Image: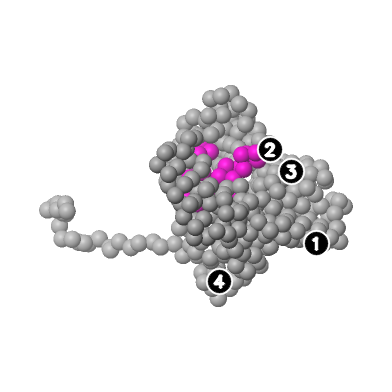
Amino acid sequence: MAKRPASAGTIGGNLPPLSLHVPEPHFRPGDPVDYSWLEIPAAGAAARPDEACSPAETQDLCFGLVRVLDEDHRAVGPWDPALDPETLRRMLRAMALTRAFDDRMYRGQRQGKTSFYMKCTGEEATSVAAAFALADDDMVFPSYRQQGILIARGYPIVEMINQIYSNRADKLKGRQLPIMYSSRAHSFFTISGNLATQYPQAAGWAMASAIKGDTRIAASWVGEGSSSEGDFHAALTFAAVYNAPVIYNLVNNQWAISSFSGFAGAERTTFAARAVGYGVAGLRVDGNDPLAVYAAVRWAANRARSGGGPTLIEHFTYRAEGHSTSDDPGQYRSAQEREEWPLGDPVNRLKQHLIALGEWSEERHAAMDLELAEEVKAATKEAEKNGILGHGLHHPFHTMFEDVFEDLPWHLQEQADQAIRERRIKWPSWKEYE
């Protein structure tokens, strides 16, 4: 241990003692909720720079909030994407289907049909509206709360449920935790349980696309808690240095599993402000406004596709429910936070916008919700024919030796043959699943 310099005098001396700052959320369980400290600018107030602008021209947008839908549910301002009613209805349906899917899978977990599930209630716009703004073949590197991307891209719900149940029809052969989907055909990169790893992967993929002279870009998602991981900063460095055609979506839903956003740096500045330090374009967006999310991601996609480089987008939203089925948010946050959240609910806001346009109604919405609930119910029953947690209908045993080597080494082949022989002796009924 280094010795204190003799010239420094007595330890402590005349200096006041140091103190450690520990971030503390505004509300704890039982506290009244008051969001008056939040600065929420009026819809339509944010300027929209040209997509080819320099990153410096987006600095103000890193500290404000891009909003499109006003208090009367009208689209206003320069960020209005002017989407046609049919596109808005498709977007609303995908968001509502995502919510219906979440509700059914949550109940399934509580019934013991799977071990784990994560809902995205209140955050549907950050995945669905973003997916609508991207090209269908743009590669996405999601975190674990972006099931809406697969749903928006038309991935069969029954296949998602098979993966959640890890049953014999699971295309990932039971090798991933529930909700960690993967689909090459839908340009949906495998979800990783190690947080923020997808960020540098997206940078690398985008750099490779640029090297090949392709036209596809990459987009990735991470929560604000995970943005304190080293992978986040490594990815931004690579993306900035090589001008990678990638969009980094940072979903600030206010809470990690039990710690609020202050532990990731929210007390000091916005998360979008990190773009300034890296010299890339940055936007801070109302994450509960589907039109604002769409407009921001489309702006960033056009910018990346035309050689403008990366964009960091902070989606300012709120996690309405628990972090996962393993979490009880009532232990660390006030129960009134969800109801008092000033930016509302993204599904309801898009519904009200369509109603204001004369293109939707409460009756049509109720009928759609019922239809989607039945659609998810039917898909669940179909998937359950392939097995649920603990019911023995798992993937064929021999697949545990597959998909690692192009040609299985002799010693692993011997192990596989021996294991299968012993399994047949001990459990003859397993033959049909081999």
Question: Residue at the location (68% across, 56% down)?
Answer: 383
Residue on which disc 4 sits = 330
Give the magenta-colored segment's residue range.
179-203
Give the Cα separation between the discs numbered 1 and 2. Answer: 28 Å
> Counting residues from the N terminus, which is met first, the one under dot 1 or under dot 2?
2
Which residue sits furthest left? 6
Residue on which disc 3 sits = 80
Q: Magenta part mainly helix, strand or loop? A: loop
- Say which of marks 3 and 4 sits in front: 4
User: Relative to residue 398, is residue 23 depicted above or below?
Assistant: below
Q: Where is residue 147 in the image (x, y as percent from the top left)?
A: 64, 51
Q: Residues within 10 Å of mark 3 (few under 14, many from 20)?
A: many
Q: Position of residue 420 (x, y in %)?
A: 49, 51
Q: Nearer the viewer, residue 382 or 392?
A: 392
Q: Position of residue 295 (x, y in %)?
A: 69, 42
Q: Mark 1 near mark 2, Cβ–Cβ under 8 Å?
A: no
- Say which of marks 2 and 4 sits in front: 2
